[in-house]
Image: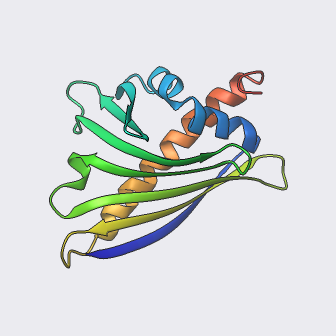
Amino acid sequence: MGITTYTQDIVTQVEATRIFKALALDADNLVPKLMSQTVKNIESTIEGDECIKKMNFVEGYPIKYLKHKIHVIDDKNMTIKYSLIEGEVLGENLEHIFYDVRFEGSKNGGCICKTISEYHTNGDFIVKEEEIKEGKEKAIELVKVVEAYLLANPFAYV
């Protein structure tokens, strides 16, 4: 098994506490509402002592679903750690993808969403740069959609 790690910083104009609440604490409700053209719903279940979130996509979307295991949601430090454990994106070559996301305040009053992603591969598979780029673009799209919503709704998630 190999591990490919990359980091990504996404800068927003919204305060860290608001974007953390929207993305880490209420994504099950907010994401399907804001991204209804692609996300059908997010189902949360408890398996043993673990929280599993299954994001189902609309019919015709290239991906049917993604299943995440939530490891840690830390309200005080505004961090979330989770793994993508199931879904077409993993294919046969990826065992899982681990994410460590931190929401930090920035000097301009906004937020920097700092992500460390670890692609855990099967065998000696090497993750291609274009696959990482695609993942980064999807993350940016999600954060920017939520940012736009929060800017348009200044009393949401305060």
Above or below residue 35? Residue 107 is below
The C terminus: image quadrant: top right
| Residue at (69, 43) in percent of width and height | 75
Residue 47 placement: quadrant: top left
Q: How is the image coloured?
A: rainbow
Is 118 left or right of 87, judged from the image as shown?
right
The N terminus: image quadrant: bottom left
**Can the viewer see residue 125 in this picture?**
yes
Residue 60 x %, y %: 20, 28
Residue 24 x %, y %: 58, 39
Residue 58 x %, y %: 28, 25
| Residue in front for this viewpoint, 39 or 17 | 17
Residue positioned most to the front: 48
Is 111 left or right of 140, judged from the image as shown?
right
| Residue at (45, 56) in percent of width and height | 136
**Can the viewer see residue 14 in this picture?**
no
| Residue at (21, 46) in percent of width and height | 88
Above or below residue 98? Residue 56 is above
Residue 5 placement: quadrant: bottom left
